[in-house]
Image: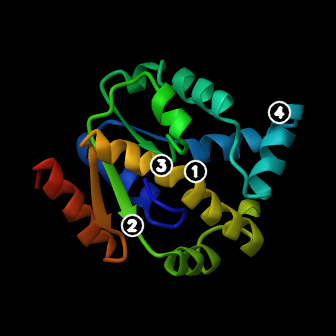
């Protein structure tokens, strides 16, 4: 977990490769859906471009459907889900560890605004600001939820990619 630009995808992919388990990013799923020439695809595209979250019930349904696929049966790494308290409470799969990669809003804005990779339509400065506000409004309670369940580990995301990865592995008790 973490604010947009915190390095969730980077760390999720590194962990997926290390442990040879599937990686599932809700953002990647929704960006693919936004490319579809359907009314749902247009809705997802417009919603994401505005920096707004896809409704909880639809998000839960989509993630649950993905997790029925064979590649997720031996384990999985989630990125960007659950993003709201309702999603956290309604999610039916067992979660073993929750890593919160913590960076400042200023760092998130800088990282997203100055990425060197492909520019995405949902990453305009206005949309980024809305997404940061949404993170504080909707995702902070999820962080508290997992903290109460003693599943949350906070990681300083303003370190190097390598150091963040090492900190995560240290909490997993692996080298």
Q: Position of residue 136 (x, y in %)?
A: 55, 60
Q: Earlier in the sequence, mark 1 or mark 2?
A: 2
Q: Residue at x 30, y 43 (%)?
A: 148
Q: Which mark is residue 102?
A: 2
- What is the distance, in whole Å, between disc 3 and disc 2 at their CAs? 14 Å
Would you say 163 lies left or right of 91 here? left
Q: Secondary structure at mark 2?
A: strand
Circles 3 and 4: CB atoms closer than 8 Å: no
119 or 40: nearer the viewer: 40
- What is the distance, in whole Å, between disc 4 and disc 1 at their CAs? 23 Å
Q: Is residue 124 above or below residue 67?
A: below
Q: Is residue 115 visible?
A: no
Q: Secondary structure at mark 1?
A: helix
Q: Earlier in the sequence, mark 4 or mark 1?
A: 4
- What is the distance, in whole Å, between disc 3 and disc 4 at their CAs? 28 Å
Would you say 149 lies left or right of 130 here? left
110 or 33: nearer the viewer: 110
What residue is pinned by disc 1? 138
Q: Which mark is residue 40?
A: 4
Q: Is residue 172 above or below residue 124?
A: above
What residue is pinned by disc 3? 141
- What is the distance, in whole Å, between disc 1 and disc 2 at their CAs? 15 Å
- What is the distance, in whole Å, between disc 3 and disc 1 at their CAs? 6 Å
Would you say 41 lies left or right of 116 here? right
Circles 2 and 4: CB atoms closer than 8 Å: no
Q: Residue at x 39, y 51 (%)?
A: 13
What is the crowding at mark 1: few (fewer than 14 residues within 10 Å), some, or many (at least 20)?
some
Q: Position of residue 35 (x, y in %)?
A: 78, 44
Q: Position of residue 117 (x, y in %)?
A: 59, 70
What is the crowding at mark 4: few (fewer than 14 residues within 10 Å), some, or many (at least 20)?
few
């Amino acid at each position: 977990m973490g604010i947009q630009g915190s390095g969730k995808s980077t760390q999720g992919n590194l962990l997926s490769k290390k442990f040879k388990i599937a990686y599932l990013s809700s953002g990647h799923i929704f960006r693919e859906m936004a490319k579809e020439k359907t009314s749902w695809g247009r809705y997802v595209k417009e919603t994401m471009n505005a920096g707004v979250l896809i409704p909880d019930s639809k998000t839960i349904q989509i993630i649950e459907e993905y997790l029925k696929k064979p590649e997720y049966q031996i384990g999985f790494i989630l990125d960007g889900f659950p993003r709201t308290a309702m999603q956290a409470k309604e999610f039916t799969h067992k979660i073993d560890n929750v890593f919160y990669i913590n960076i400042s809003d200023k760092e998130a804005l800088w990282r997203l605004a100055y990425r060197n990779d492909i520019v995405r339509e949902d990453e305009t400065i206005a949309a980024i600001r809305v997404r940061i506000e949404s993170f504080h409004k909707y995702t902070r309670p999820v962080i508290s939820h997992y903290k109460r369940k003693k599943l949350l580990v906070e990681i300083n995301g303003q370190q190097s990619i390598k150091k963040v990865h090492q900190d995560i592995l240290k909490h997993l008790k692996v080298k």
